[in-house]
Image (cartoon, rainbow, N blue to C red):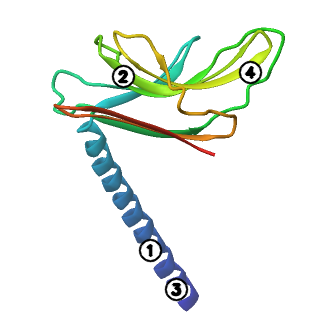
Amino acid sequence: MQEKRKFRTRAVFLILVWVLLLVLSLSLLSILASLFASYPQGQSVSSLSWAGYIIEKDSNSKFEVMGVNASWIVPKVNVSSGDGYSSAWIGIGGQSDKSLIQVGTEHDVVNGQDTYTAWYELLPSFAVRLTSIAVSPGDTMIASINIDIHTLMCVFQSKK
């Protein structure tokens, strides 16, 4: 008889703990959902020519993207019989307006030769190669774009 009572007490205790954990989890999810709802909505985008992450500003949003940072490792391209082109980059703008700044690396195979370059682009101008930055497979690239009312700053470096 006493064994059954101990078992019931333990079962009730475990059920109460599980209910408490469930309530806490749901509360945390509610808090996280409200935090995410207060920021611009992001979405992943894929196409045949590029893939990326876009944050769109809606008309009710009081937030703007004023900076972006990233790092990546320059891939080694596979030299084959055909030409191939690839880039890794970060940018701000260009989705719903004509303003765009971006900085990145190019990793191409042209005429059986692999080439690696750094570049930046500020529309409406064309991309500019950064010949002062040597780019090689395996390099860690660190990029940052920051915008404020008076200045536009782009920092880009390679770490061997």
Q: Earlier in the sequence, mark 2 or mark 3?
A: 3
Q: Is residue 36 left or right of residue 45?
A: left
Provide the residue designation for mark 1.
12
Q: Residues within 10 Å of mark 1 (few under 14, many from 20)?
A: few
Find residue 102 and report its horizontal and vertical position in percent.
Answer: 41, 24
**Which part of the image, by quadrant, shows the N terminus?**
bottom right
Q: Residue at x 34, y 59 (%)?
A: 23
Provide the residue designation for mark 2.
101
- Say if residue 153 shows up in the picture: yes
Q: For the residue marked with disc 1, what is the amino acid?
A: Val
Q: Which mark is residue 114?
A: 4
Residue 4's place in the image compared with 122, above or below, is below
Q: For the residue marked with disc 4, what is the amino acid?
A: Asp
Res 91 quadrant in image: top left
Question: Of residues 110 and 60, which is closer to you in this image?
Answer: 110
Res 62 quadrant in image: top left
Q: Residue at x 64, y 34 (%)?
A: 74
Q: CA distance from mark 2 to mark 3?
A: 68 Å
Q: Residue at x 64, y 40 (%)?
A: 139
Q: Earlier in the sequence, mark 4 or mark 2?
A: 2
Q: Is residue 89 left or right of residue 66?
A: right
What SS does tag 3 mark?
helix
Q: For the residue marked with disc 2, what is the amino acid?
A: Ile
